[in-house]
Each structure stands twice: as structure tokens, then as C-alpha cells.
Amino acid sequence: MSQSTPVMQKISCLDLKGQHDQIKEEVFAAFEKVYEKTAFSGGPFVEEFENHFASYIGSKYAVGVNNGTTALHLAMLALGIGVGDEVIMPADTFIATAWGPSHAGATPVFVDCTADTWQIDVSKIEEKITPRTKAIIGVHLYGQPFDIEGVQAICKKHNLYLIEDTAQAQGARYKGTTVGVFGEMACYSFYPGKNLGACGEAGGITTNNESYKKHLHSLRNHGCEVRYYHDEIGYNYRMGGLEGASLTIKLKYLEGWNNRRREIARMYQSQITNPKVKLQHQPEWADSIYHLFVITTDDRDHLMKYLNERNIFPALHYPVPCHLQKAYAHLGYKQGDCPNAEYLAAHCLSLPMYAELTDEQVQAVISAINEY
Ligand SMILES: Cc1ncc(COP(=O)(O)O)c(C=O)c1O
């Protein structure tokens, strides 16, 4: 029999199986309780998660909804943002950040990111403010906090609301404080691939403001406080009981998972030495949870092909910046309007990043990149 070199196991950008195998019994036991109570839509399992999540974030209230996009939509409605209003946000984010204002009838206004942190460039915000501007959505992109105080100062000066898009950053810290408490509201995605992901689709909003919380409760539930009495046009944006129950269990593990991601990131940061590769700059006040570990390189497609040949499968977050998406062609942006975001889109590559990656897998990724 001929001896062949063992083929390295495939390393994907994300693999949810390991995490779910670890907690399967616990989650199934919780699902049984939901089933026994037939508490499938909203209800006690969602409330339990909301209470735990609010105390984890350090906010007074958490409101569970059915995904992160509807969380952003409701945040806009609760702030009274709608037709004729403008909402400023970074051009380099997942498109759902822009869906929030768009679904409310408002217009997203895209600002470039900096060349090194890939977060909203605070120095470019003020030139985009008009009498119609109502809010800024800051995005903790890839799990790394944006320059919160910089954006807060502009909000204060121009009387604008700040909303945090915390979809990718559950547990990240800004100057030691967990993000999600700096704006009027913070919006989360609990999509399965997120650091804290439900077994299903889910999202949430945190706030310290009781009247926002009450309004969000009504909006997510057909615009009613009392069943079948509808005070305003509402939505069916409730979180499911199975999703809530799975999130309560996963929340217990989140710090551990986030810390393992930090450990993997430190290995990438200290051991990737190939000068062809650039990493995201992390200011000292930003404690990322590395939802994604993104690098840039001159010939991204070539590096992708090279890694694929070595059984390593990175991903792209995101190949087209929001201002150049077809969906927003009517807004009239053109190539060159946000050069740093455009550069990032054309050169980014997300390396494998999830808590269950073994040190050997991380080393395999590092060696492959250094040998490139
Ligand atoms: C930055 C950002 N905002 C919003 C969302 C929307 O969340 P969801 O997919 O749960 O609707 C996501 C998730 O994909 C995201 O990454």
C-alpha cells in the first residue's frame, strides 16, 4: 500500500457544529420545556433571556425581536424617524444597517471609514449633516468598537440620536465598558453565525429609556399593549420561545467563547508576519470580540485561491460597500465617494474565526499565510 500525506482537514471561515455539539443536551432540555409550555412566540423564555441579556450588557432593558434587521427598523420607528429624514452610517457595513432607516422610509447617508481601523471616519461625518439628519448609526464592525466618544460629540453638537449597531459585537468593550449602552438604543443580531447566535433567527434592542422600551414592546406586537386593541400600525416582530431559550443557555458561555476568539486573534496578530498582509488597526481603547478577523492584501483573489488549495476557506465581508449596492443606485453615489470602504471591499479577506478552532488549525492558517 502506498503511503500518502494525510490531507489536512478543511478549515472554514465559520463552523457552527462544534459549538452546538457541546451544548446540545442542555439546549434540547430547554426546548422540551418550551414545548411543554407551548410558549413558542414571545412569552417566559424570551423574557428570561431579555433579563439576562440586559444585565450582561449593563442596560436597564432588553427587548427581543425576530432578527437584527427588524431591531434596526423598530429603533428608527421608536425615535420617530421616517420619510424625509436622513440617517448617517458607515459605508462599510452589512447592508442591514441601512435597511433600518430604509424600511422606516428614511434615507441612509454613507460615510467613509478610516484607512486603518475600518470604522466610521469621524472627521468625515459633519460634512454629511443636513437639516434632515436625525441620527447616526455607529457600527461596531467585525466586533471592534468604533470611536464612540468621537461620534457622541458630533451627536451632541448637532442634536442627533446615536444608535449602536451591535449586531457583530456582543460583549465587546469600549474603554472597559461593554458596548450597547452608549446610544439611545443598541441593536443586536442573534443570527446563528453571530458570536451570540440563536438556534434560529433572532435579534434584540437594549436601552436605558423606559418609554422606548414600552414603545418597542407595542411595535413588535402589532402595535398593541392590550390584545386586539391596536394603538398604531404595528409589526409582527416577536422573538420565538425556542430562540429565547437557546439564547439563555448560550449567553452563559459567551464570555468564554469571546475570550477564546481573543486568544486566536492574538495568535494571528503576533504570528502573521507576511508583509503582503495588513491587519485591522485596533486602538488601545477597543476591546474587540473578533466576530470576524479581516485582513487586506493587494491581490485578494489570488490569496483566496492559494488558501483554498491548502484546504483553508476564508470569506468576504463585504465585497461591495453599501453606497455602491444596486439597491441604492437611486441615491446617486459613485465609485470614489468612499475610497477607504471601496479599498476594503476589494481587498478584504476574513480568516477562519470561531471559538472551537484548535491551536493546530490556527497555526495551519498562520503558516499558510506566512508562506504565501
Ligand atoms: C452589522 C449588522 N447589522 C445588522 C445585521 C442584521 O441582522 P439579522 O441578519 O439578524 O437581520 C447584521 C447581521 O447580519 C449585521 O452584521
Image (cartoon, rainbow, N blue to C red):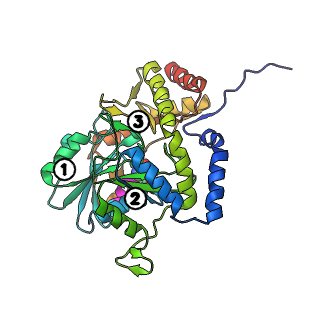
**C-alpha separation, residue under disc 1 versus residue under disc 3:** 32 Å
Q: Are marks 1 and 2 in contact (CB under 8 Å)?
A: no
User: Is-magenta flag for residue 97?
Assistant: yes
Bounds of the magenta segment: 96-100
- Give the mark, 2 or 3, whose residue is nearer the N terminus: 2
Q: CA distance from mark 2 to mark 3?
A: 30 Å
Residue type, numbered disc 3: His
Residue 192 in view here: no
Residue 59 counted in the magenta span: no
Residue 97 percent coordinates (x, y): 36, 53
> Which amino acid, mark 1?
Cys
- Farthest residue in the bottom direction? 229
The disc labelled 2 sits on which kind of residue? Ala
Q: Dot 2 lies on which element?
A: helix
In this view of the protein, which residue sits in the foreground, 291 or 303? 291
Q: Earlier in the sequence, mark 1 or mark 2?
A: 2
Q: Report which residue position mark 3 lands on.
A: 347
